[in-house]
Image (tube, rainbow, N blue to C red):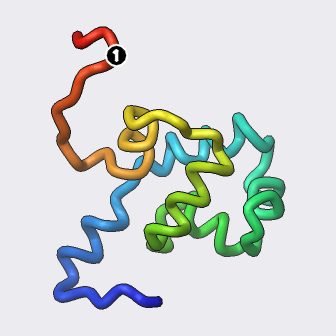
Amino acid sequence: MSIKWTNDFERRISMRRDTKALRGKVIEEYGTVCKFASAIGWSNRKASYIAAGKQVMTAQETEDCAKALHIDNARDFMRIFYPHVSIKWTDEKGA
């Protein structure tokens, strides 16, 4: 399945993820991007492009990436994959 972009603006918005945070999480969990690529079943090139923000991820790839990196809460997920989206929410304590 491919994403059909209606304009370049939508494509650029979808690519905005916190690449420093994503790369940091990859290194924290796997040590190298190559080991992460092997664990998730991607080529080294694809993993490197995604970690550098040069390739758009599909929704399924984003989900697979989050699972492989053990991102299990909304705060970290949004911080890494959608930092440009402003959401209002509370933690479990209601703060």
Which amino acid type corresponds to the residue marked 1 in the rendered image? Glu
Along the horizontal axis of the image, is 46 left or right of 1? right
In which quarter of the view is residue 83 placed?
A: top left
The image shows residue 44, relative to residue 35, as above or below, that is below
The image shows residue 35, relative to residue 76, as above or below, that is below
- State the residue in front, 21 or 78: 78
- State the residue in front, 38 or 92: 92
Please tell me which residue is depicted at 68% across the width and 50% down the height of the picture: 68
Percent across and percent down for residue 21 are 50, 40
- State the residue in front, 1 or 53: 1
The image shows residue 16, relative to residue 82, as above or below, that is below
The quarter of the image holding the C terminus is top left
Circle 1 — which element?
loop
10 Å neighbourhood of mark 1: few (<14), some, or many (≥20)?
few
Residue at numbered disc 1: 92
Percent across and percent down for residue 79 are 38, 39
- State the residue in front, 35 or 53: 35
